[in-house]
Amino acid sequence: MDFITNLIWHDGKFLGVEWSAWKGIGYAGTVIFFSRFLLQWYATERKKQVVVPQAFWWLSLTGALLLFTYSVHQRDSVFIVSYGFTWIPYIRNIIIHRRHKDAHTDCAGCGQKIPPQANYCPNCGGKVV
Ligand SMILES: [Zn+2]
């Protein structure tokens, strides 16, 4: 019991951590960055196929920017390089997601969105004209 109490409250601080606004930014970045895996896992289990939702890239971008900000504050070159360039594929994937979504057409029969290369509506089976 003493071990657990000492772990939670150490050196007069919660978890023995010197808390600051910068630590808040760093931890927020870590939590947001990690949450993308839970989201992706959930989306994949739901569809029973590997899916990467657009929100995955937004969580990646947000988490990476927070961690990059924290790393600059810490002046840790390894950490800065780790998060300094990851935004490039994140933004590119967000753009591709948007373009793909915009390329969908509306089904004349049922009004549902039809994927760009489809010849038939996946909802009602109507031929795409
Ligand atoms: Zn349809």
Image (cartoon, rainbow, N blue to C red):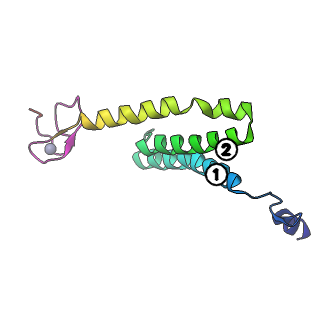
Q: Which residue is mark 2?
A: 70
Query: How many numbered badges does the structure rendering display?
Result: 2
Q: Label for residue 102?
A: none
Please tell me whether mark 2 sits on a helix, a strand or a loop: helix
> 51 or 67: which is nearer to us?
67
Vertical comparison of 90 with 21: above or below: above
**Quarter of the rendered structure image containing ligand 1:** top left
Instruction: Residue 46 in the image: state x and y as whole percent.
Output: 42, 50
List x then y, in percent, for residue 76.
74, 35
Q: Amino acid at mark 2?
A: Tyr
Q: Which residues are magenta?
A: 107-127
How many other residues sit within 10 Å of disc 1, few (<14), some (14-19) or many (≥20)? Answer: some
Q: Which mark is residue 25?
A: 1
Q: Quadrant of the C terminus?
A: top left
Name the residue located 87 percent from the left edge and 67 percent from the top edge. Answer: 12
- State the residue at coordinates (53%, 45%): 62
Q: For the stretch drawn in magenta, what is the main secondary structure?
A: loop
